[in-house]
Image (tube, rainbow, N blue to C red):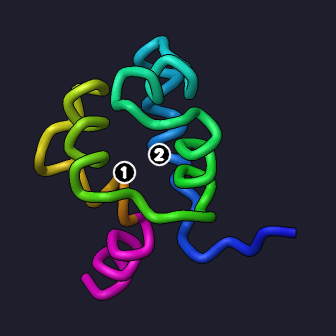
Amino acid sequence: MKKKRYAELNALKGRIREMGTNYRDLADEIGVASNSLSNKINGFQAFTTKEMEQICEALDIAPGDVARFFMPGYCKTQRDSA
């Protein structure tokens, strides 16, 4: 059984649905295998910077929202310390 090493990216999952796409189509658009994209979204592997940039472009994610979609633990820490 695989062990999650990273946070599950629930906001990113929601954005994919909101934009009317799916893992397979998004994976094709950014040039990765759909199972690899799924592993990354579900916290089993990390995204590369290039993949994050491509996903932001594909899903119309603004630069100021990158942390919310790709670093949920960081955002929670920031909210808790405020």
Q: Position of residue 61 (x, y in %)?
A: 23, 35
Q: Main secondary structure of the magenta part?
A: helix
- Seen from this angle, which residue lies furthest right? 1
Seen in the image, is 51 located left or right of residue 57?
right
Q: Which residue is mark 2?
A: 11
Residue kind at label 2, given as amino acid type: Ala
Q: Nearer the viewer, residue 81 or 65?
A: 65
- Seen from this angle, which residue lies furthest bottom? 81
Residue for point 56% across, 28% down: 23
Residue for point 49% across, 15% down: 21
Whether residue 38 is in magenta: the answer is: no
Q: Is residue 67 above or below residue 24?
A: below
- Proximity of marks 2 and 1: CB atoms separated by less than 8 Å: yes
Seen in the image, is 1 located left or right of residue 53?
right
Q: Is residue 77 above or below residue 19?
A: below
Q: Which residue is mark 1?
A: 69
Q: Residues within 10 Å of mark 1 (few under 14, many from 20)?
A: some
Q: Quadrant of the N terminus?
A: bottom right
**What separation in Å lies between label 2 and label 1 (alpha carbons)?**
5 Å
Element carrying mark 1: helix
Residue kind at label 1, given as amino acid type: Phe
**Sequence-first disc among 2 and 1:** 2
Q: Position of residue 69 (x, y in %)?
A: 36, 51
Residue for point 33% across, 69% down: 75
Seen in the image, is 69 located left or right of residue 12?
left
Whether residue 74 is in magenta: the answer is: yes
Residue for point 74% across, 74% down: 3
Which numbered tag is attached to residue 54? none
Element carrying mark 2: helix
Q: Position of residue 32 (x, y in %)?
A: 45, 37
What's the magenta region? 72-82
Location of residue 82 by image quarter? bottom left
